[in-house]
Image: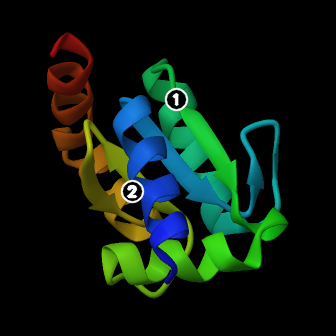
């Protein structure tokens, strides 16, 4: 990953309380896993931003290296890497995700 790509990812994460690196965007997810994450965030009613990694191959690979996580989507809340679709589903089902989001948005 180039220093420019790392700086770009750093800035995106710092500038957005809830950020999803995904295939597609919040209005048109391009894969089922990305859609799962968007549906969960929409149900929670939180404000979030998305970054379509399909538009930038360097960013697509860079986010995987940045988080040391091999798959997309990737969710960051309050600057912290949370995980992908499976982890988001688990956190949502056990009630932890709502708490994580509330703390992040309150800070």
The residue drawn where x is 46% and y is 80% is 64
Give the image location of residue 28, x and y in percent: 85, 46
Q: Looking at the image, is mark 1 or mark 2 earlier in the sequence?
A: 1
- Front-most of 105 and 5? 5
Report helix, strand or loop for mark 2: helix
Q: CA distance from mark 1 to mark 2?
A: 17 Å
- Which residue extends farthest top? 106
The residue drawn where x is 25% and y is 36% is 78
- Front-most of 14 and 52? 14
Using the image, determine if residue 45 lies above or below residue 67. above
Left or right: 71, with 81 as reference point: right
Left or right: 61, with 44 as reference point: right
Residue picked out by circle 1: 48
- The tag on residue 76 is none
Using the image, determine if residue 9 lies above or below residue 25. below
Give the image location of residue 26, x and y in percent: 72, 39
Give the image location of residue 25, x and y in percent: 76, 46
Disc number lying in front (1 or 2): 1
- The tag on residue 89 is 2
Using the image, determine if residue 84 lies above or below residue 68. above
Q: How is the image coloured?
A: rainbow
Q: How many marks?
A: 2
């Amino acid at each position: 990953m180039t220093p420019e790509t790392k700086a770009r990812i750093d800035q995106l994460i710092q500038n957005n309380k809830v950020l999803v690196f995904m295939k597609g965007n919040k209005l048109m997810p391009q894969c089922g896993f990305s859609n799962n994450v968007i549906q969960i965030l929409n149900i929670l009613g939180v404000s979030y931003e998305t970054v379509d990694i399909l538009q930038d191959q360097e960013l697509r690979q860079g986010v995987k290296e940045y988080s040391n996580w091999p798959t997309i989507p990737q969710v960051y809340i309050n600057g912290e890497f949370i995980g992908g679709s499976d982890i988001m589903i688990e956190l949502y089902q056990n009630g932890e995700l709502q708490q994580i989001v509330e703390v992040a948005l309150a800070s």
